Image (cartoon, grey):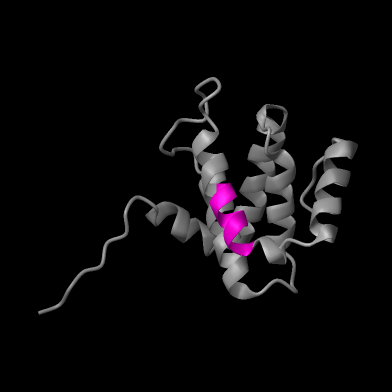
Amino acid sequence: MATTEHSVGFEPADRLAQDRDSVRRRFWIKFKKVVAKLPFAEDLLAAYYCAFDRETPRHVQAALLGAIAYFILPFDFIPDMMPILGYTDDAAILATAIRLVAGHITPEHRDAARAALKRGTFAEE
């Protein structure tokens, strides 16, 4: 008798995280739209730079890409359009992923995030 495995609620994020080009493209589209509303923008960018760094181990990339994919999905547990609360679930997912892989997010990733925010111009980097 065959068994079927089910994951709880993250199937679309899992599929999206496997498509790195789509994550990269969709990340920048959403990030540009909402950067002013994100108190965790620097952490999100540092995680992004770490996830796409060729020196980052694959398991770390996978964890961060999953969190980034959750951020860019148009639907989630708390809709992003809700004032104040809209990004709390995104922040929680990102914070959890960062805690799991914190040693891999380097000062260079954080410096790149701060520099991008300071410039205020965001492109697919």
Observer able to see residue 29: yes
Query: Which image quadrant is residue 29 in?
Result: top right
Quarter in which the C terminus is drawn: bottom right
* Place of residue 99 in the rendered image (x, y in percent of width and height, measured from the top left): 60, 56
Q: Is residue 70 above or below residue 88?
A: below
Quarter in which the N terminus is drawn: bottom left
Q: Residue at x 45, y 60 (%)?
A: 15
Q: Is residue 107 left or right of residue 37?
A: right
Residue closer to the observer: 18 or 108: 108
Query: Which image quadrant is residue 11 in?
Result: bottom left
Q: Which residue is farthest top?
A: 83
Residue closer to the observer: 18 or 9: 9
Q: Residue at x 56, y 66 (%)?
A: 62
* Place of residue 69 in the rendered image (x, y in percent of width and height, measured from the top left): 54, 51
Q: Which residue is farthest left?
A: 1
Q: Is-magenta flag for residue 65?
A: no
